């Protein structure tokens, strides 16, 4: 058995959701909205399921979806992608990540990662034979810093794996952070794998900048997106990868033996959804921003220390005042008070950070209010 996987615990999202079910808790842990997602997109998917073709679609994705992806990123982010050679559909961003790391890393290659990091990253990098070089990001700002990057990059760096916006800290890296990272990628001839699944869920008028758009990055960036986040349909697991044709040829080799393809009816529905006008995206952002404010203000009134959330469906509270053990805090919260949350130590190698707890605000007002009542009892 491979020791990387043999010694791993079950992912924190699965564990916390199981605990939430067992204790009848309000689940603000695993990130999923309680909204069912846009009705018209679900309807297009349902119609395609009943009347459409349900056999294997092409390995790279339905042509109509690849075209829709290229048009979507041209419209929203000014990217110039060739749908036929620079866009691939995957079964969620997770497959895209796994495939990219399998395809790009040779055993012994160094991979620069940032802590906190999505919990899948480190096991996938290790299983691919990569040697992790971890850049710690300092709370509460979580910005990229030149000295920390200089300590992590080396001539052996092959890949840098960035998540922007960043789950769990809800940080949106801006032009300055990205320019700094791009300079290191160019200097050390590294490929950037940029997990941008939260690109549309950004608040307060901010705009997401794709790393791929920076000077010198077009040919060395693998951009990853997810319809699950864009349309609040997390169970659909429709993801996409964008990269220049040379890189894409290699990524496609991994994809063909991982999943080969993704359900065609869901692909058709996502193609329809990606053409939605700006009003949809603005409305979606405004809805989540209101939910963020409702939870943040409620927590603030209760005396919790709330960290800023610039993006994603998450905000963090600092629980140092409760003794600083996030795992114990979350266990007590779900068992005694009926609210599930995520201990942020799950996003750190060796659980190095212990005083932050992540809460998902992608919920109806009534759910947020009910959770706040329970959180009042937990103080
Ligand atoms: N990357 C990040 C940073 C995520 O937060 C998530 C899920 N929330 C994923 C990847 C996985 O996306 P998908 O469900 O499309 O596989
Ligand atoms: N990405 C989701 C989160 O951060 C969880 C995905 C999963 O459950 N694997 O909550």
Image (spheres, grey):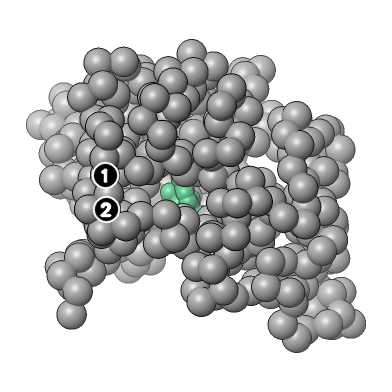
At which x and y percent is residue 329?
19, 43
Query: Residue 93 appears at what percent x and percent y?
Result: 53, 55
Q: Does any portion of residue 378 appear in the rendered image?
A: no
Label 2 element class? loop
The single residue placed furthest to the bottom in the displayed view is 55
Q: Is mark 2 within 8 Å of ligand 1?
A: no
The residue depicted at 18 percent of the width and 35 percent of the height is 353
Q: Nearer the viewer, residue 371 or 104?
A: 104
Q: Does residue 93 appear left or right of residue 161 in this picture? A: right
Q: Is residue 135 above or below residue 338?
A: above
Q: Residue furthest toward the left?
A: 323
Q: Residue 212 in the image: x percent, y percent?
A: 59, 33
> In the rendered view, would you say 96 is above or below 369?
below
Q: CA distance from mark 2 to mark 1?
A: 6 Å
> Closest to the observer: 203 or 227?
227
Residue 209 locus on image (x, y percent): 61, 26
**347 or 12, which lies in front?**
347
The residue at 82%/43% (across/down) is 71
137 relative to 27 in the view: left or right? left
Q: Residue at x 58, y 64 (%)?
A: 252
Q: Quadrant of the C terminus?
A: top left
Residue in the image at 85% along x and 65% along y = 44
Q: Is residue 45 left or right of residue 377?
A: right
| Label 1 neighbour load within 10 Å: few <14, some 14-19, many 20+ | many
First in residue order: circle 2 vs circle 1:
1
What residue is shown with label 2? Answer: 130
Snapshot quadrant of residue 259: bottom right
Residue 31 seen from this side? yes
Residue bearing the label numbered 1:
110
């Amino acid at each position: 058995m491979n020791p990387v996987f043999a010694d791993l615990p079950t992912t924190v999202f699965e564990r916390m959701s199981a605990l939430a079910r067992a204790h009848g808790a309000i689940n603000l842990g695993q990130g999923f909205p309680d909204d069912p997602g846009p009705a018209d997109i679900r309807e297009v998917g349902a119609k395609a399921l009943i009347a459409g073709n349900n056999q294997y679609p092409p390995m790279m994705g339905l042509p109509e979806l690849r075209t829709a992806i290229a048009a979507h990123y041209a419209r929203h982010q000014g990217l110039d992608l060739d749908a036929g050679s620079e866009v691939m559909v995957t079964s969620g961003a997770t497959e895209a990540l796994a495939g990219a790391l399998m395809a790009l890393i040779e055993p012994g290659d160094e991979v620069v990662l940032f802590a906190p990091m999505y919990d899948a990253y480190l096991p996938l990098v290790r299983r691919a034979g990569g040697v992790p070089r971890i850049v710690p990001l300092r709370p509460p700002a979580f910005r990229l810093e030149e000295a920390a990057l200089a300590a992590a990059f080396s001539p052996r760096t092959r890949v840098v794996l960035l998540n922007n916006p960043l789950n769990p800290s809800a940080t949106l890296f801006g032009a300055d952070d990205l320019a700094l990272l791009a300079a290191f990628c160019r200097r050390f001839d590294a490929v950037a794998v940029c997990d941008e699944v939260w690109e549309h869920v950004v608040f307060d008028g901010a705009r997401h900048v794709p790393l791929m758009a920076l000077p010198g990055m077009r040919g060395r960036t693998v951009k990853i997106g997810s319809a699950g986040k864009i349309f609040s349909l997390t169970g659909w697991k429709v993801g996409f990868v964008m990269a220049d044709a040379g890189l894409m040829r290699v990524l496609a080799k991994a994809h063909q033996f991982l999943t080969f393809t993704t359900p065609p009816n869901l692909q058709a529905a996502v193609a329809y959804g990606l053409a939605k006008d700006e009003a949809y995206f603005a409305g979606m952002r405004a809805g989540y921003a209101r939910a963020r404010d409702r939870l943040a203000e409620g927590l603030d009134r209760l005396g919790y220390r709330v960290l800023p959330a610039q993006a994603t469906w998450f905000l963090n509270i600092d629980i140092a005042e409760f003794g600083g053990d996030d795992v114990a805090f979350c266990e007590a919260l779900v068992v005694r008070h009926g609210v599930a949350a995520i201990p942020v130590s799950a996003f750190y190698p060796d659980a190095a950070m212990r005083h932050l707890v992540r809460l998902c605000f992608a919920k109806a007002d009534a759910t947020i209010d009910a959770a706040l009542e329970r959180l009042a009892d937990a103080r």
